[in-house]
Amino acid sequence: MYFCFMLLSTKGIVFKTIKFQETSLIVKIFTASHGVQTFMVKGVRSTKANGKAGVFQPGMLLDIVMSYQESKQFNHLREYRSLLVYSTVMDDVRKSSVLMFLIEVLEQCIEENSEDDRLYAFIEQSLINFDQHPFDPDFHVHFLLEFMKHLGIYPRGRQSSTLPYFNIKEGEFTDRLLSKEFICSVEASSLLNSVLTNQPPPLKRVDRQQLTHLILDYFGFHIEKYRGAKSLSILETVLS
């Protein structure tokens, strides 16, 4: 049987890396041209590879040439190199913790083969800006809210005296407590409303944590494959 493959040059963001056998890696990369793809990278962990496995750390931005075949479980990387060497992220534990957290969330929320060049461009440029600017402890909150727009689940409406509660399940503000399981408190709803309507001053630590948990609960209701971020506890410790 004859299988046809295409040789494609594109950009990618490393989402997940798993060690395979003694010298290889299985790498999940969100590509600009073909969405999330999984690659088998052989021999990259061998002593002769001269540290090449470092380019496959989650969050790294790459230029790649891949042999693409739609029906294959693993495609092949013909060439790969760093698109950008972070200048601050890897040396700042706060930034590296935020990056680890965001990549974990992204990996669970973006479907395989979900080609979306606008989403790719948003993530790439956001990570570049994050690296090049002073650390902002609220960056991940604003990033995830903007990410919701690309997923089509951005909260609808705004809080008012007649619509005081945010309903996580419905994704909108409501006037009544239909179920405490789905309804945020007035205080949490006000906090969400403040970042949806304007760019508030830096959040207090307790408010940032509450809003982050609210956002992740929201993903849990609206993204089928999202199962929670294990790195959240590390992020909260670093930012405390």
Image (cartoon, rainbow, N blue to C red):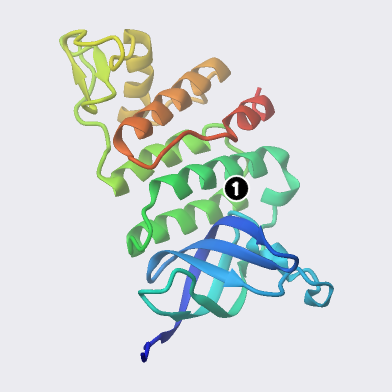
Q: Residue at x 51, y 23 (%)?
A: 208
Residue 39 horizontal/vertical position (percent): 53, 69
Pick the residue in front: 212 or 22: 22
Residue 205 position, x and y percent, is: 57, 19
- Quadrant where the image shows the N terminus: bottom left
Q: Nearer the viewer, residue 98 or 199?
A: 98
- Check the picture and name the quadrant holding the C terminus: top right
| Image x and y of residue 211, in percent | 44, 23
Residue on which disc 1 sits: 133
Which quadrant of the view contains residue 134?
Answer: top right
Looking at the image, the residue that sits furthest to the right is 47
Indicate whether 61 appears above or below 123: below
Q: Secondary structure at mark 1?
A: loop
Residue at screen point 67% across, 25% down:
237
Quarter occupied by residue 152 = top left
Identify the amino acid type marked 1: His
Please tell me whether residue 16 is drawn above or below residue 101 in the rendered image.
below
Where is residue 95? Give x, y as percent.
64, 42
Crowding around mark 1 (Cα neighbors within 10 Å: few <14, some 14 to 19, many 20+) is few
